Image (spheres, grey):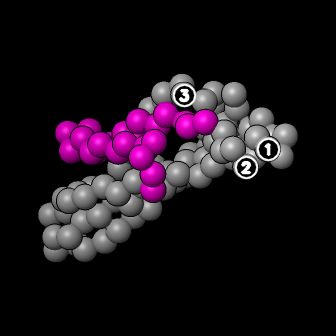
């Protein structure tokens, strides 16, 4: 149904906004996207029914203090977006993307 459910973004800088796009490749007749749920506030998903695309605006946050205290200057993170359809084709898909965040 999706061209991919996981995208590797590589290395990103703290605070640099990126757009992550997940394209629906097969539309199921009668299916609508009713809700998108992000795993955190740094990822904001939007559904465009005209293009069949979920676009996630992602802005990585600072390196967590506990990692800085350990001398680390980067971290790896995976973000999730649940795509929920509650009509006749009740289903939930999980789209993910992963990146390494650096200062």
Numbered circle sitting on residue 92: none
Residue 63 falls left or right of residue 20? right
Q: Position of residue 80 (x, y in %)?
A: 48, 55
Depth order, front residue of 95/57:
57
Q: Mark 1 and mark 3: span between their CA atoms?
A: 20 Å
Q: At 29% from the left edge and 64% from the top edge, which residue is drawn?
A: 84
Q: Which residues are magenta?
A: 39-62
Could you tell which of marks 3 and 2 lies nearer the N-terminus?
A: 3
* Residue 79 visible to the viewer: yes
Q: Quadrant of the C terminus?
A: top right
Dot 2: few (<14), some (14–19), or many (≥20) neighbours within 10 Å?
few
User: Which residue is label 2 attached to?
Assistant: 66
**Identity of the residue drawn at 63% across and 27% down:** 13
Residue labelled with disc 1: 69
Q: Residues within 10 Å of mark 3 (few under 14, many from 20)?
A: some
Marks 1, 3: nearer the viewer: 1
Residue 25 lies left or right of residue 47; in this view the side is: right
Mark nearer the N terminus (1 vs 3): 3
Q: Are marks 3 and 2 in contact (CB under 8 Å)?
A: no
Q: Position of residue 61 (x, y in %)?
A: 55, 37
| Residue farthest right in this picture | 71
Where is residue 21 drawn, in percent x and y? 42, 39
In the image, residue 101 above or below residue 41: above
Helix, strand or loop at label 1? It is: helix
Query: Does the residue at mark 1 contact the one at mark 2 (Cβ under 8 Å)?
Result: yes
Q: How many marks?
A: 3
Q: Quadrant of residue 83?
A: bottom left
- Camera-near label (3 vs 2) is 2
Kindly identify which residue carries mark 3.
15
């Amino acid at each position: 149904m999706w061209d991919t459910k996981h995208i590797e973004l590589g290395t990103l800088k703290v605070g640099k906004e990126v757009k992550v796009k997940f394209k629906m490749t097969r539309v199921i007749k009668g299916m609508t996207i009713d809700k998108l749920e992000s795993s955190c506030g740094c990822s904001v998903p939007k559904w465009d029914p005209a293009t069949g695309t979920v676009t996630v605006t992602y802005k990585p946050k600072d390196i967590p203090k506990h990692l800085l205290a350990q001398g680390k200057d980067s971290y790896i993170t995976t973000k999730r977006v649940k795509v929920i359809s509650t009509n006749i084709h009740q289903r939930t898909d999980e789209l993910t993307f992963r990146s390494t965040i650096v200062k």
